[in-house]
Image (spheres, helix red, strand yellow):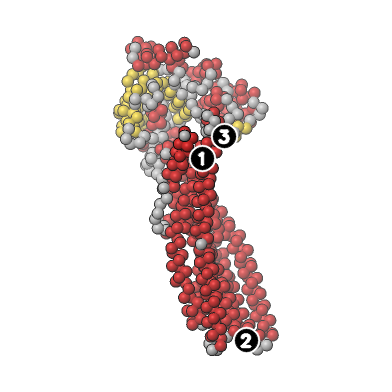
Amino acid sequence: MEQDMTSKQGQERFHYSIDNVIDKPYNWSQMARLAGYMKPYLNKWLPLAAFSLIAVTIVRLGVPFLMSIAIDEAIQKKDWSYLLSLTAIILGLYLLGWFESALRIRWTNQLGHSIIFDLRQQLFTHIQRLSHRFFDGRSAGSIIVRITNDINSLQDLFTNGVVNIFIDLTILIGIVVMLFVLSPTLTLGIMIVLPLMFLISIKLRKKIRLSWQKVRLKQSSINSHLNESIQGIRVTQSFTQEQENISFFKRMNRDNYEAWRAATQQSATFRPVVDMAGAIGTAILIGLGAALIQADHISVGVFVAFAYYLGNFWEPISRLGQVYNQLLMAMASSERIFEFLDEKPSVPEKQEAVELGVIRGEIELDDVSFSYDGRRDVLHEINLTIRAGETVAFVGHTGSGKTSIVNLICRFYDPTSGCIRIDGVDLREVQLDSLRSQVSIVLQDTFIFSGTIMENIRFGRPGATDAEVMQAAKEIGADPFIRRLPGGYDTEVEERGNVLSQGERQLLSFARALLADPRILVLDEATASIDTETEVKVQRALNRLLQGRTAIVIAHRLSTIREVHKIIVLDHGRLIEQGNHEQLMRKRGTYYNLVSTSFRVTEKE
C-alpha cells in the first residue's frame, strides 16, 4: 500500500508539470527575435545565400523548360546538334546544382553552429548573473536542459530550415509562374487540390505544436529527476529505495517515449497529406493533359515539363511542412530559453552604481527586515553594527536567521525594508563585483569542482601563483594531507570531491577563502564537519589569519566562539542578546541556556 501511494505521488508530481503546457497561437515575434541571432553573420553569409538561391532557382526551373524544348524542337524535328547543345546545357545546370548544394551544406552548418554557440554562451552568461532567488525555485536539471537540449533543438532550424524556407518559397513561386506560362488551363486544374490540402494542414498545426511542447516538458522533467537521482544516490541506497527510483524513472521514461511517439506521429501526418495531394494532382495531369494534347492545346514537351514541374512542386511543400515542424519545435524551445533570458536579477545593480574601493570592513544593519517569499519575514527590524576587524559570532536555533543575515551582507538578496551599509555605503549603491570580491564565504556543505587540488584552491584567486596556493594551504593546515595524496597538489578530484573526506574538503575550502584575502570572511558553520583534532589546527590558523579582517562566524559548536569579540544571539529572526562570552553568561539568558545545553550534550557524549 505504501509503495503504491509513493508511486501515485511520484506520478502526480510528474504529471503536474505536463499541465503547464500553454495553448497559445504561434508566436511570430518570438521567432523574429530568434532570427535576430543571424544578424551578426548576414554580411558574411548573405552573398552565399543569394548565390545559392539564384543557382537553385535556375536549375529547378531551367531543366524542365529545356527538356520541353528538347522534345518539341530537337527530338521531334530530329535536330541532333540542337539536342546535343541542350543536353550539354542541362548537364551544366546539374553540375551547378551539385556545386551549389555542396557549398550550401557547408556554410549553413557553419552558420547554424555559430548561432547555437552564441545563444548558448549568452544564456549561460545570463544565468551566471541571476540572483539566488532564481535558483531557489528551480532544480539544477531544469536549468541544464535549457542550456543543452532546448538549444540543441534549434540546430536543424538554423542549419537547414531558415535557408530552405527562402529557397523552397522561391521555387514554388517560380514553378507556379512557369506552369501558368505553359498552360493556364492545366495549371488551374491541378491547383484545385491545394485549398483542401491547406485546410487539412491548418487543422494539424495546433495538435503538432502542443505535442512538441509536451515533449520539451517531459525532457525537462527527466533531466531534473536524473540530476536529483545522481546527487542523492547515497540517500537512495541508504534507504534501499533503488527499486522505487527505477520504477519512477521507468514511468517518466515511458511517458517521454509516448510524448515523442505522439509528436512524431502528429508531424508525420503532414507528409501523407502532401503525397495524397500529389497523387490527385498527377491523376488530374494525366487525364486533363491527355485531353489537351489531343485537342492540340499543349504539346508533348509541355506535358513532360508539366510532369517535371509538378514533381518539383510537391517536394518543396513537403519540405516546408518539415520546416514548419522545426519551427514548432523551435517555438517550444525558444519559449523556455527566452523565459530565462528575460529573467531579471532580483538583486539589480544600478547603472550609476559606484565601485567599492578597498574596504575596512565595518558593517551596519539599520532596521533590517527580510522575507524570502514576500509573505513571512525571517528577519525583524535588525539593528547591528560590526566594527572593522571584529570577529562576530551569530548563534541561535535553526531558523533563527543567522544565514539570512549573511546572505544580505553578501547581497545575495536585498532587505525587504531597512538598509545595510559597509563602511557607511549602502550596498544597493555599489557594484556587486566590487563587493563580493572582498567577501569570502566558507560553507558547511563544501563544493569541490572537478579538477586538481591546486585549481580548487586557486578558485579563490585565479591569478595566484603555485607558491601562494601552497602557502595558503600550509597556513590553514591542509598541506600535510595534500602531500600524502598520490599526485599532491596535482591530484585530480571529481565533482564535489568525493575522493576526499568531509574534513579534507572543508580544509580546502578554508584555503580557497584565505587565498582570496578578503576584507570580510564568513564562516557559515564551517567547522561542523571537522573532527576535534582538525578543528584545533584550523582554529589556531584562523586566530592568526583573521587579524585585521572582519569575520562573521556561524557555529553550532559554541565552544569555538568563546574568544570572539562579540556574540549575537538570534531567535525567530529577532536580535535578542549581544555581547562577549563572559557578558552573556552573566546575563543567564538565552545564550546561557544554549551553552548549558551544549555542555550537557558534550558531557553525555
Label drawn at residue 73: 2
| Secondary structure beneath label 3 | helix
| Secondary structure beneath label 1 | helix
Residue at 68% x, 88% y is: 78
- Where residue 224 appears, as percent x and y from the top left, is 49, 41
Where is residue 202, by image quadrant?
bottom left
Distance between the alpha carbons at the discs numbered 3 and 2: 75 Å
Tell me the amino acid under the disc marked 3: Glu
Residue 311, compared with residue 447, is above or below; it is: below
Tell me the amino acid under the disc marked 1: Phe
Q: Earlier in the sequence, mark 3 or mark 1?
A: 1
Label drawn at residue 248: 1
Where is residue 363, by image quadrant?
top left
Distance between the alpha carbons at the discs numbered 3 and 1: 26 Å
Residue at 33% x, 36% y is: 374
- Where residue 304 appears, as percent x and y from the top left, is 59, 80
Q: Residues within 10 Å of mark 3 (few under 14, many from 20)?
A: few
Residue at 58% x, 30% y is: 498
Distance between the alpha carbons at the discs numbered 2 and 1: 72 Å
Task: Please name which of the two marks, 3 or 1, marks the residue nearer to the observer.
Answer: 1
Kindly tell me whether residue 262 is visible in this rendering: yes
| Secondary structure beneath label 2 | helix
Where is mark 3, residue-wise?
A: 495
